[in-house]
């Protein structure tokens, strides 16, 4: 139970990956040919970018893949010196028993502009012996000269059905008793991130013999959905005082951050029993106050103001 499940159940081959069939079929064609261009993997966290790169290395190099594969996290080493020293030193050495080696740069969108321009030149100079796989969450942060040198693969968030099926299979293998509503709570917390979904499930399984929706809510770190919905119902019915008391309970007693509460407000708005026209107005207000939070406004004041605006809209 102490083993990290995300690593234990990571697919070893491309064909074992689920939820990215289009990406897998294209990559498998390259593997079959024994050739590989520079690759750019773009997509949200936990969608399989790192797993795909490791599968490629294993299928190309077999048991000796460690010798021909370098993995770096660009968010930790994002400066130009990393490209000039670590990347360049590995790129200019000859591959062992194969035509080319692979350098995998995770979170490449965190590289500085200078580092990306240095990387562009390195990709060009050592293309005979080295292939680059760049993974990023936001492709727009990768400079166009690098994008044009790569075959682009877009990873989409995993669907709820695919993630749920995987979690159920994992629970069966590990002998974990999970209630059906708990799976939905995990999926809400993960938002398409398979890695987070597995981590939440493992953490909940360590704490309780039977994983319930309440257990998942406690370990996921998000605001209590039932409490947030009750707060919103008070606000939209015009009872600002009760809504404010519920908000203070979430912040002061339960210790939730404003960002966590705002995310849950966004989720719960759609389930409120109010006309669609009014939901549109509430959603517009939610976006406005979320922007104020990101700009550094006082969280408590902004959340209270948001509830006040919801109560005022009742009269419209």
Image: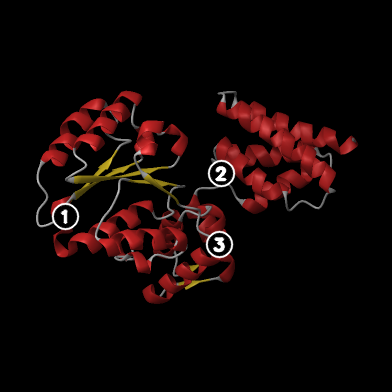
- Residue at image position (24%, 57%) is 57
Q: Position of residue 316 (x, y in %)?
A: 90, 35
Of mark 1 and mark 3, the one earlier in the sequence is 1
Q: As rendered, which of 243 and 268 lies closer to the eye?
A: 268
Disc number at residue 254? Answer: 2
Residue holding disc 1:
66
Q: In the drawing, does residue 219 fall left or right of residue 79?
A: right
Q: Nearer the viewer, residue 180 or 103?
A: 103
Mark 1, mark 3: which one is toward the viewer?
A: 1
Reading the image, the residue beneath label 3 is 160
Q: Residues within 10 Å of mark 3 (few under 14, many from 20)?
A: some
SS for callout 3: helix
Residue at x 33%, y 35% (from the top left corner) = 75
The Cα–Cα distance between marks 1 and 3, rounded to whole angstroms, is: 34 Å
Q: Is residue 156 left or right of residue 5?
A: right
Q: State the image quarter where residue 308 is shown.
A: top right
Q: Are marks 2 and 3 in contact (CB under 8 Å)?
A: no
Q: Is residue 312 left or right of residue 152?
A: right
Q: CA distance from mark 2 to mark 1?
A: 46 Å
Q: Quadrant of residue 247?
A: top right
């Amino acid at each position: 139970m102490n083993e990290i499940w995300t690593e234990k159940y990571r697919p070893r081959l491309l064909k074992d990956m689920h939820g990215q069939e289009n990406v897998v079929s294209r990559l498998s064609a390259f593997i079959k040919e024994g050739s590989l261009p520079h690759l750019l993997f773009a997509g949200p966290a936990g969608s399989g970018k790192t797993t795909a790169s490791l599968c490629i290395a294993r299928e190309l190099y077999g048991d000796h893949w460690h010798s021909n594969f370098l993995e770096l996290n660009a968010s930790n080493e994002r400066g130009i010196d990393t490209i000039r020293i670590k990347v360049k030193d590995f790129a200019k050495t000859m591959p062992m028993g194969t035509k080319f080696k692979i350098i995998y740069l995770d979170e490449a969108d965190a590289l500085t502009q200078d580092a990306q321009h240095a990387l562009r030149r390195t990709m060009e100079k050592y293309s005979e012996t080295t292939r680059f796989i760049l993974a990023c969450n936001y492709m727009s942060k990768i400079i166009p000269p690098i994008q044009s040198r790569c075959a682009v693969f877009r990873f989409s968030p995993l669907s709820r059905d695919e993630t749920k099926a995987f979690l159920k299979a994992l629970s069966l293998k590990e002998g974990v008793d999970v209630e059906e509503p708990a799976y939905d709570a995990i999926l809400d917390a993960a938002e398409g991130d398979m890695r987070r979904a597995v981590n939440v499930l493992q953490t909940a399984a360590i704490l309780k013999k039977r994983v319930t929706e309440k257990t998942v809510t406690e370990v996921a770190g998000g605001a209590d959905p039932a409490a947030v919905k009750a707060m919103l119902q008070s606000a939209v019915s015009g009872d600002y005082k009760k809504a404010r008391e519920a908000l203070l309970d979430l912040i002061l007693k339960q210790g939730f951050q404003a960002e966590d509460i705002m995310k849950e407000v966004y989720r719960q708005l759609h389930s409120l029993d109010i006309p669609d026209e009014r939901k549109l107005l509430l959603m517009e207000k939610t976006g406005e106050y979320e922007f104020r939070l990101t700009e550094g406004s006082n969280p408590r004041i902004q959340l209270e103001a948001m509830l006040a605006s919801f109560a005022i809209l009742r009269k419209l």
